[in-house]
Image (cartoon, grey):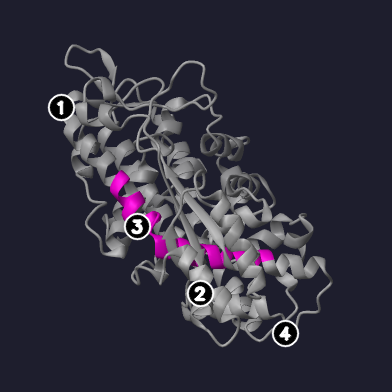
Amino acid sequence: MAYSEEKLSEEKVFKDPVHRYIHVRDRVIWDLIGTKEFQRLRRIKQLGTTYLTFHGAEHSRFNHSLGVYEIVRRIADDVFIGRPEWNEEERLLSLCAALLHDLGHGPFSHSFEKVFDLDHEHFTRAIILGATEVNKVLTRVCDGFPEKVAEVIAKTSQNKLVVSLISSQIDADRMDYLQRDAYFTGVSYGHFDMERILRVMRPREDQVVIKQSGMHAVEDYIMSRYQMYWQVYFHPVTRSAEVILTKILHRAKELHKQNYTFKYDPIHFYSLFSGKITLEDYIKLDEAIILYYFQMWQEEEDPVLSDLCCRFMDRNLYKYVEFDPAGEYKKLAELSALFKKAGIDPEYYLVVDSSSDLPYDFYRPGEEEERLPIHLLLKNGDIRELSRESEIVDAISGKRRTDHKLYFPDDFLSDDSKKPNIKKQIRTLLEID
């Protein structure tokens, strides 16, 4: 029997709080789960610093990756099977791409990427195509199979239907993380009727479509996503923690550039600081490593690095006020000057942070960024874009919401033992007295 068709002698199951059970019968999938690159995802939190806001949000990208795999498995084995538009030969490709789609995420992923100019999608491809255990498993399926999986995840595959299962405006990735993140944060916003959505999904040549009778379930899904972004993902306390995390990494990078002698040598950061990180070094990075350095750097001689690390580890986060970058740029310059006079470095202690989300959109001719819209399958067989049928979705289509906040250390400004008059001016400008 070919490796691609090999089944386990007995089905393996993972008990899961979202999907109840995650089922594995394929030898390829079981072998991929056992690779060191996939096991590394246990040590990368799905929601980064969100655990400092919602204490239950300790779940990992390992959990999420299994969940996305399970949704795609159900679609392939229960919903699409036997339908003429679905090529059963693409089943294993879909399952592998679903399982491995987040393989390249680093510790505290998005903050980490911004500081060191990294791209987790690049590292996902590198792990799949490089000298790794994952690549060895995929290569056993057939020559060129790792490249096919990488192309699906990169959205460059010719098989648009398989791509849309994992990356579209209603895909297995979003359906898992919304429910999983809602469960672990304890909120009610991210819940929607996934069972109904799966039942009304239909394969077409270029993408998944939704039967018209399932439109209201999709509306609920889109509103759930909108609420999760503003109530959980963009929570201002979580953003405060991300600001401090980002500033720690910036400070460590700057100190290295200045040839500062660290008490605790950041050997895991050297290739990051140089901008030439190897795949081998990247795979070694996880959040346990990063938190170890933050713990140690609390004792550094540099007061900024030490203070920032203490803040992060002890959850002494920055406060914030609403901020309008367009109308208040003069105020920001004035505050920055006052911070300097007060002996507080505005580079690290006065930070504007912005969040932006587009709940749903459709492709508009002439735009560079392609957005694969959600299409409804009408009773007469016609295909129609969702916002043309749904008044709810039409009302939010293309409407980007952006939020700006100004973060600062309130404890520094409340300490009147040094420069009390200047700090009073700062508090007055911030309107926090």
Marks 4 and 3 sit apart, C-alpha to C-alpha, by 36 Å
Q: Do the residues labelled 2 and 1 touch (CB within 8 Å)?
A: no
Label 1 Cα neighbours within 10 Å, binned few <14 / some 14-19 / many ≥20: some
296 in relation to 275, above or below: below
Sooner in the amino-acid sequence: mark 4 or mark 3: 3
Residue 14 rendering spot, x and y as whole percentages = 33, 61
Q: Do the residues labelled 4 and 3 touch (CB within 8 Å)?
A: no
Question: Left or right: where does residue 414 sit relative to residue 334?
Answer: left
Q: Is residue 74 magenta?
A: no
Which amino acid, mark 3?
Val
Q: Please provide the residue range marked out in magenta.
A: 225-250
Sooner in the amino-acid sequence: mark 2 or mark 3: 3
* Residue 424: mark: 2
Which dot, 2 or 1, sits closer to the camera?
Answer: 2
Q: Name the residue under label 1.
A: 213
* Element type where label 4 sits in the image: loop
Marks 2 and 3 sit apart, C-alpha to C-alpha, by 33 Å
